[in-house]
Image (spheres, grey):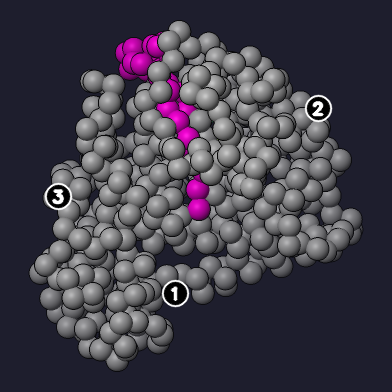
Amino acid sequence: MQNDYTEITEGFAVDYPMAQPSSAKLVLFNEELFERLELNWTEEEILSYLSGSSSVEGNPASALAYSGHQFGHFNPTLGDGRAHYLGTTQGHNTSDLQLKGSGATPFSRGGDGLCALGPAVREFVMSQAIQSLGVNTTECLSVITTGNDVYRQGYVPGAVVCRVASSHIRVGSFQYLAFQEDKTGMERLLDLAIKRHYPQIQSEGDDRVCDFLKHVCNNQISLIIDWLRVGFIHGVMNTDNCLVSGETIDFGPCAILEAFDFNAVFSSIDKQGRYAFGQQPNIAHWNCARLAESLMLIMEDDEEQALAKLTDVLNDFSKSFNEAYHIMWSQKLGLPEWQDSDNTLLSELLVLMKNHQLDYTNTFAALTSLAINKKVLFTVPVELNEWLAKWQTRISEFDAAEVATLMSNANPAIVPRNELVEKVIEEFYETGHSPILEKWLPLLSNPYEYKEYDKVFTSRHSKPDTYQTFCGT
Ligand code: AMP
Ligand code: MG
């Protein structure tokens, strides 16, 4: 393990001790990820390193500085207020290991630096589920209860999560260096980001900066397309929660879309719907614009020309997004080709789904089960009868096997349902483990498998309008 961030600039990675657990207990562990990381730690080391009891192999833990636009408002000094970066692994899969809930740091701004068990469990379940859904994401290696209580709405058990990311370089990390006007620091951060994520970039000077922005935009597009495809609502797409690698990070107020609605919002603090389901593409574009703005610091051209070059890259975002967006819907609908009239077919379906509050996953799963000749598995809602006939006529123009493959790869049969995630959390609070999760996690790990499921795993939230999620808990 090594620390890749101390070299960026002074104050970028601040060594800081972690809070000591009074009795660490491993409650969730991702064996498969552990193997992939090639860590070779003993059980004792796992517990000691991943609970924050001791730093890893002598590397002092550190908190990273970053800025961020939170709900559109710029905050120059955010940083890891309740997280410690442990180091970067040197195996095949270079990854940052970070503990969350490991105590206050110089960036805590009055917060306690801790994490309650519930949100830790949520991060573990959601990250593993969406990774299995094929979405680019940070992963969760472990959840360890600390034996210390944390105060939220009353006292609850505290936990530490170990997050694994291909890096923790955020749009907000570039914003931080831009705010400091630290050109050398930003050049170093750009080098690190390119080395980690985009080694294919061979250009130099301003072209290299623009190529980097282009790659970040493309990865953000792929990410958002996947979120839309599986019905994931991140909930707090602030620039500090936007990684330049294009991985999903921070599962605080996230949710799964159940009753279809582009305006769906679950986060208790997102009163304006800034981060609503259907707003996510616009926000990703907006976040990339904040990255472009920051990168201006290291452009060599005069201001006007530099701005024009970066703007050109940003202008491609919408075009590339729209192309990918059509491909996504054509896959979900089983159409190997898209023609103009398919826009009507799609919008008719979406209007019906919205008006009748149809379940996003189950509706597409029902169409898929028809296409793969397993129609007993999911039922097409009666409200779609008329539309269904039009869709069936359209797909009959194509090879049935091709339609089936497209749909079964794009439409999951099983997703991390909001209400069930809450039940898992309740079980952890009540007994320290979750029988539901033991049955559910293997299913979530194979979400495109069309087979008979216990209804509990495919039923949606009983009161879709009242479900709420919370930040920073
Ligand atoms: P998040 O909503 O988790 O992305 O956090 C936004 C910012 O608030 C980050 O700088 C976090 O480190 C910080 N933060 C969130 N919760 C806490 C906490 N309990 N104590 C200290 N800082 C926190
Ligand atoms: Mg965050």
How far apart, in angstroms, are the residues tagged by discs 1 and 2?
A: 45 Å
Q: Residue sitting at 42 percent across and 32 percent down?
A: 29
The residue pinned by badge 2 equals 10
- How dense is the environment of label 3, judged by Cα within 10 Å: few (below 14), some, or many (20 and up)? few
Q: Which of marks 2 and 3 is in front?
A: 3
Horizontal side of 246 relative to 379 (left or right) equals right
Q: Residue sitting at 35 percent across and 86 percent down?
A: 341
- Type of secondary structure dominating the magenta stretch: strand
Q: Give the range drawn in magenta.
A: 136-161
Q: Residue type at mark 1?
A: His
Can I make out residue 203 in this image?
yes
- Could you tell which of marks 1 and 2 lies nearer the N-terminus? 2
| Viewer-closest of 167 and 23 | 23
Dot 3: element: loop
The quadrant of the picture occupied by the C terminus is top left
Horizontal side of 466 relative to 309 (left or right) equals left
- Could you tell which of marks 2 and 3 lies nearer the N-terminus? 2
Q: Nearer the viewer, mark 3 or mark 1?
A: 3
The residue pinned by badge 1 equals 326
| Viewer-closest of 78 and 170 | 170
The answer to whether mark 1 and mark 2 are in CB contact below 8 A is no
Q: In this view, does 391 lie above or below 202?
A: below
Q: Residue type at mark 2?
A: Glu
Please give the label number shown on residue 454.
Answer: 3
The quadrant of the picture occupied by the N terminus is top right
| Viewer-closest of 333 and 17 | 17
